[in-house]
Image (cartoon, rainbow, N blue to C red):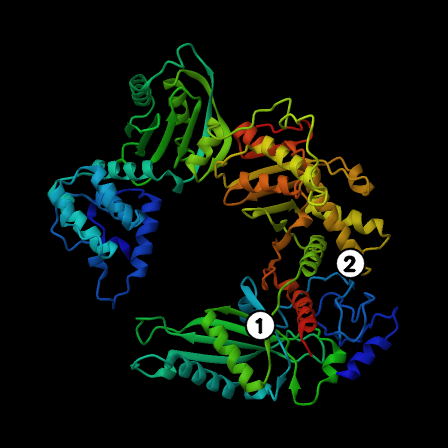
Amino acid sequence: MGSVLLSSDWLIRPRPERRFVLKFSVASASAKPNKSRSLVDVLGLNLPSGNMDDPAKFLLRRLVRRIPAQMLKATLEKWGRLNAEQRESLNFSQSKWALTQELEALCEESRLTVKHIAELEMIYITENPNQMMWHAFQLLDPEDGALAVELMQFKELFKCHLRELVRNVSVKIKKHTDEAVWIRMSWGEGFSRLSHLNATYVVHYLQTPYVFVSGLSPKNKPLLLQVLTLSTKHERIKDANLSGRKLTAIRDLLLRQYEHVFPTKYPSPLTERNQSVSNLHTEKEQAEASAKRHQMAGQAFGNGVLPALQSAVYKLETKFKDPTNQTMTEQDEPFRCVVKFSSTNLLESLRHCASSGIASTPVAPLLSSIPLKGRNYFVITDKSPSANS
Amino acid sequence: MDKSRTSVTSTPISSVSTRRIRRRSFRQSTRSHFGVASRLGLTPGQTTHRFNTSRKAPKPQNITEKVSPEHLALLVKTEWHLCYVTPLYRFRHTQLKSYARQLSAFIAAEKQQGLGVEVGGLQDTFKVSMSVLQGLAETNDDPETVLIQVQSRPAFARQDEPLKTVWSGWLSCINGNPEYLHSLPKDFTCLPLFGSRGLEGLSSLVKSWLRSTFDCFFGPLDINQTTLRWLAALWTNCHMESNIQHLKMQWTLPAAPPLHVAYTVNSGDALALWRSVRKSRGADEEACIEIEEVTSFMEGLTSHFYRHFGVDLSAGDLNQVSTALGSAKVKGRMKISSSRYLISTLSLLTECAFLKIPI
């Protein structure tokens, strides 16, 4: 049904992008024939055929749908591809599909291609990275000069190594304000045209061994990881077992950019010798225990605002040890289960559990490993009581 | 109601009423049934029933011969919102067609309130069908299950397009408490379990029509913590016959912000733990399951959790239990994924409904 309205260019394509096809079929199913806007209108095929091709149109449409209305104006301004006059002509109070039509017309006027639309997407994602699923990787075994790799060198190395390994890929590297290098990559299959719709985003903080990746298909994963390893002058790269939607949270966790409590020999300030006797009636009984719990919770997780990690997964394969249940304790096989903790701010919840007594203090090493090791996926077996990768 | 109360308190402790059930030739295995009044030592007379402390393990039943496949497909694999209903006054299974007409007129009238001029036949907008869902009733006392479906044409659709079911619900009573059922006056029909799925507005309309027509009362059937634990244990027990794939429990701990824990146990290991708990009681496979076994089972699971994380799950609430056979949420939502355990699960829910009925 949908193929009738596609341009012939896409019909010839042997394997259309799955994501693109799915989106299209959803759009066509929702447009009822009796509605005043016909399906043809929705796809904007009534517009005079400009030089904006279909991938650019689809990317633009998807972007406008995705970017919330209030951010769209600022993002377009930052993009800079439309001049002030064109931007002023846009009416941001109308419905999104009408806005899309206007934008398409403007882009065709300015002869913008899919590469320019990709730029717009990159600007939006860079400003709002907390909407995609990010996975962290850690670079290991730095060679000499790894720490000295700065932006220009990294860019050169990355593009060079990438070109050696992959032929059909488009790369855009940009430095964001806070020392982060953002890379957007569009992959093409074999010799077919590049698909800008499923781009991979990579964020690397120079001089740190961490890389965050989103939207990487398993097929391209070994390639990208190899290129990253080579261009940062390391020898290996491994999965850091840390993933989450909020890039800022997982970045803060790994780079330790949040308040810590340094372990100290004297946990509380030294008491004065001649302490005035406080009113015993007003002192709570649980004060000391509560203070201790708070302190241990703070030591395990940190005392200030914690990065908003959202989930942690533990795959447990340990033996069931219970003195009251001899039958299970005697079994040799491990008791397999998977535990997933989730919350709007996981570390905050865990710290609160520890300080309020729901979790026993000192905090269990499995829980304190999350901030300590900077990971949120663990496989626990009996051989090593701590997490192993 | 006094008659039923005295009958409960006079029943001797040791007897679990085994009732002669009419054996039907196509039934494959022995019926499972749930024992009647339990002994929790609470003062009698506060409510007529108490939650059972012991049950027989539910056996899988092949009910495809009793219930038509279309009806089964309607009930199974959907999540139902459950309520309890007090007995219905002057409800006749024979008058379902006229009830359906009345209900569709009622819905149309309610929808018209406050709206402007409507074009087209109002009666066509919502079409109600009520039918009897044959085959679910287990005993002679159980009234037959009634199925209610509200269909309507989707907006902007053409006239010849088929109607889509926008709301469905059912009233049922499976293995109802016989003393209670016998003690009801003649004109009352007891269908205490009400399940609904679909638009919330239609649910309230259907309920208010039933309320005004049959003088009954609806209330939420919250599946409480005990029932959820029972379901966890019973479903694990079913793993011997049907693969439950996993036992997944979802807890919420009262931290700030609230912490959700999803604890998924491998089905084989859960069964091993369950078996070890039962063995320690000295019970054989066929005997009743006691609540102490359920408690020990849950304690085993939570203590394993505590040993690793130092977090006591009993500080929070168990919100949801799910296996491949179905899922139950504490807010009164239930999904039965396998038709083989449909009857036993509905019996358990009927029992919960009986507990909640205020009279």
- Numbered circle sitting on residue B68: 1
In the rendered structure, the residue with mark 1 lies on which chain? B
Residue corresponding to mark 2? B291
* Among the two numbered marks 2 and 1 on one chain, the one whose residue lies closer to the N terminus: 1
**Front disc: 2 or 1:** 2
The front one of A218 and A97 is A97
The front one of B71 and A184 is A184
In the rendered image, the quadrant that contains the C terminus of chain B is bottom right
List x then y, in percent, for residue A373: 55, 28
Q: CA distance from mark 2 to mark 1?
A: 35 Å
Q: Three-letter amino acid code at disc 1?
A: Ser
The front one of A388 and B302 is B302
Q: Kindly identify the residue that appears in the image at 27 percent across and 32 percent down.
A: A191
The front one of B80 and A87 is A87
Q: Secondary structure at mark 1?
A: loop
Q: Three-letter amino acid code at disc 2?
A: Ile
Is residue A139 found left or right of A16 in the rendered image?
right
- Name above or below for residue A207 compared with residue B258: above
List x then y, in percent, for residue A277: 70, 36
List x then y, in percent, for residue B100: 49, 84
